[in-house]
């Protein structure tokens, strides 16, 4: 059996202090819901967009286990502006598997962008990164991911333990279906300390100070052989001074 390690959740009131002191912080669903001013109906309605994600055609390991959409924004205080659709690009320094490639994923659909909760999510996470690094305009990349067990195994982070080359990474766990595995691991970038835990609660949230920690998620497998399982996440990255590849 695969053991699930309980996430070390912090209360919402400690969000900024814990993120600053340890380089990451975990919030449970209730605190995330209160932080966003959302109810379960709104959260589930937004999650419905994950049922319409195109396949990722750029996987260099030959897999077929990842579906995604990608859109970009500039968040400045309460202002959210979608920028013209652009490629997702990372240097090899941060992504040894897919770095150096211009990856043109399908953008988010208008109905998702128009959902009243979407703008609120971008603004609230922007407040968290501004509390950590100072207020400024943030270049934000939004990644809607579904990792499934089409190949018998799915890899949430095929590039392995990594940093993203940004100021903050936000990982919203939206849901798991009929899978085992998918353990999150967070390590000090310049030290021996680390944490491991399994995110299972829908709409729990992991915030990462990307300069200070390295992160990865272990592969997923189906709970029942032959039954398709999946893991849905929303990953937001916030970066000062423009997007990578500008």
Image: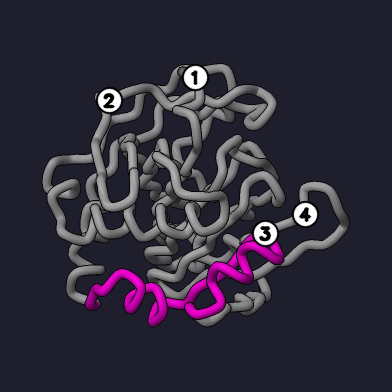
Residue 36 drawn above or below residue 167: below
* Callout 2 touching callout 4 (CB < 8 Å): no
Please tell me whether mark 3 or mark 4 is closer to you in this view.
3
Distance between mark 1 and mark 3 Cα atoms: 25 Å
Q: Indicate whether residue 26 is drawn in magenta.
A: yes
Marks 2 and 4, how far apart at CA: 33 Å
Residue matched to label 1: 245
Q: Which residues are magenta?
A: 12-39
Instruction: Decide which of tag 1 and tag 2 comes sooner along the chain.
Output: 2
Is residue 99 inside the magenta stretch? no
Element carrying mark 4: strand
Q: Earlier in the sequence, mark 2 or mark 4?
A: 2
Instruction: Choose between 136 and 191: the one closer to the eye.
Output: 136
Q: Residue at x 28, y 43 (%)?
A: 53
Dot 4 alpha-carbon crowd within 10 angstroms: few under 14, some 14 to 19, many 20 or more:
some
User: What residue does disc 4 label?
Assistant: 188
Label 1 environment density (alpha carbons within 10 Å; few <14, some 14–19, many ≥20): few
Determine the residue positioned at 61% across, 70% down: 17
Question: Considering only vertical position in the picture, is 55 above or below 185?
Answer: above
Counting from the top left corner in percent of width and height, residue 5 is at 66, 76
Q: In the rendered image, which residue does mark 3 sit on?
A: 23
Examine the rendering and report whether any part of residue 237 can be seen. yes
User: Which of marks 3 and 2 precedes in the sequence?
Assistant: 3
**Colour option used:** one colour
Counting residues from the start of the chain, the first of labels 1 and 3 encountered is 3
Residue 193, percent from left and from top: 83, 62
Residue at 28%, 30% in the rendered image: 106
Circles 3 and 4: CB atoms closer than 8 Å: yes
Q: Which residue is mark 2?
A: 85
């Amino acid at each position: 059996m695969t053991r699930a390690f309980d996430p070390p959740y912090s209360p919402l009131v400690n969000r900024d202090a814990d993120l600053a002191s340890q380089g990451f912080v975990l919030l449970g669903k209730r605190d995330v819901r209160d932080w966003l001013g959302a109810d379960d109906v709104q959260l589930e309605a937004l999650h419905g967009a994950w049922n319409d994600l195109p396949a990722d055609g750029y996987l260099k390991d030959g897999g077929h286990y990842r579906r995604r959409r990608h859109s970009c924004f500039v968040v400045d205080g309460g202002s959210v502006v979608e920028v013209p659709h652009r490629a997702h690009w990372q240097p090899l320094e941060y992504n040894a598997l897919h770095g150096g490639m211009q990856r043109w994923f399908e953008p988010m659909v208008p109905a998702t962008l128009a959902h009243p909760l979407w703008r609120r999510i971008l603004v609230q996470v922007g407040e968290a990164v501004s509390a950590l690094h100072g207020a400024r305009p943030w270049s934000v990349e939004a990644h809607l991911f579904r990792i499934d067990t089409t190949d018998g195994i799915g890899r949430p982070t095929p590039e392995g333990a990594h940093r993203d080359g940004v100021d903050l990474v936000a990982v919203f766990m939206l849901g798991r279906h009929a899978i085992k595995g998918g353990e999150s691991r967070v390590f000090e970038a310049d030290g021996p300390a680390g944490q491991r835990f399994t995110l299972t609660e829908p709409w729990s949230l992991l915030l990462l100070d990307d300069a200070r920690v390295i992160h990865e998620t272990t592969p997923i497998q189906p709970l029942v052989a032959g039954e398709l399982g999946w893991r849905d996440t929303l990953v937001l990255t916030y970066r000062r001074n423009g997007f990578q590849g500008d």
